[in-house]
Image (cartoon, grey):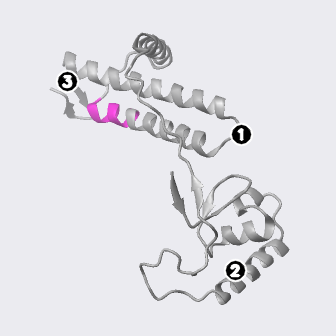
């Protein structure tokens, strides 16, 4: 846990710096602009701008660039906690391998056996890692359906593991082939 001088949105828990439009929205509308985006009116936006102008004019900015509170008046520090995940040391390796084998079969059914360059395999893996990153982002910042999002993170992780293991197997087995594409020799 750590402390910050940020305004926390009571609806979503996101934190915003002093003097930001988000902070102004929290003070005038009771929630940040992200939470209020579907119900925002021009009057609301004017209230936020008016509040921010007043806030900035009333606060004397510090000349000290090291000052953690440039407005010299921030709300009491907010304590936030980050979810931490403990390494399970592959205690369920057998179950994970079963899931990887199922995912492997799903990929084979969908795409068949493929022969690609190392860079193409890397591109596929990178795309899967991007999907895993999106799933983690959704899990951490979208609390509407946390159980489903947690399952989605696990599914994407299995897809990454499956493709990474396929690449490891390809390089361990070192069965390279040569292929001519548009007059260029690929492989060798």
Seen at 57% across and 81% down, the residue is 72
Q: Label 2: which residue? A: 52
Mark 1–mark 3 Cα distance, whole angstroms, equals 51 Å
- Contact between labelled residues 3 and 1, with CB atoms less than 8 Å apart: no
First-in-chain label (2 vs 1): 2
Tell me the residue that label 1 is attached to. 144
| SS state under label 2 | helix
Q: Secondary structure at mark 3?
A: loop
Q: Nearer the viewer, residue 46 or 131?
A: 46
The CA distance from mark 3 to mark 2 is 65 Å
Task: Give how far across and how far down residue 165 sits, in percent.
Answer: 33, 21
Task: Tell me which segment is drawn in magenta.
Answer: 117-124
Q: Decide if residue 2 is on the left or right side of residue 97.
A: right
- Rendered position, 18 above or below 37: below
Whether 185 is drawn above or below 4: the answer is above
In the figure, 55 relative to 20: above or below?
below
Residue labelled with disc 3 = 178
Of residue 91 and residue 38, the one placed in the foreground of this image is 91
Q: Going 68% across and 82% down the picture, which residue do you hit?
A: 55
Residue reaching furthest to the front: 76
Q: Residues within 10 Å of mark 3 (few under 14, many from 20)?
A: few
Q: Is residue 86 magenta?
A: no
> Could you give the CA–CA distance between mark 2 and mark 1, rounded to whole angstroms?
31 Å
Quadrant for the C terminus, please.
top left
Q: Residue at x 45, y 34 (%)?
A: 128
Which tag is nearer the camera, tag 3 or tag 2? 2
x, y percent for residue 123: 37, 37
């Amino acid at each position: 846990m750590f402390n910050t001088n940020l305004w926390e949105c009571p609806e979503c828990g996101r934190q915003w710096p002093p003097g930001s439009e988000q902070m102004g929205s929290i003070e005038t509308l009771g929630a940040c602009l992200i939470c209020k985006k579907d119900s925002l009116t021009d009057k609301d936006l004017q209230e936020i701008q008016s509040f921010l102008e007043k806030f900035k004019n009333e606060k004397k900015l510090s000349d000290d660039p090291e000052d953690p509170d440039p407005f010299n008046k921030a709300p009491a520090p907010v304590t936030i906690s980050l979810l931490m995940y403990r390494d399970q040391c592959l205690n369920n390796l057998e179950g994970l391998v079963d899931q990887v084998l199922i995912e492997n079969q799903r990929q084979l059914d969908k795409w068949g056996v493929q022969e690609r360059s190392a860079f193409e395999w890397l591109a596929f893996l990178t795309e899967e890692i991007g999907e895993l990153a999106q799933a983690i982002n959704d899990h951490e910042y979208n609390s509407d359906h946390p159980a489903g999002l947690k399952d989605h993170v696990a599914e994407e992780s299995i897809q990454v593991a499956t493709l990474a293991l396929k690449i490891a197997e390809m390089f361990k087995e070192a069965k390279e082939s040569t292929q001519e594409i548009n007059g260029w020799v690929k492989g060798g």
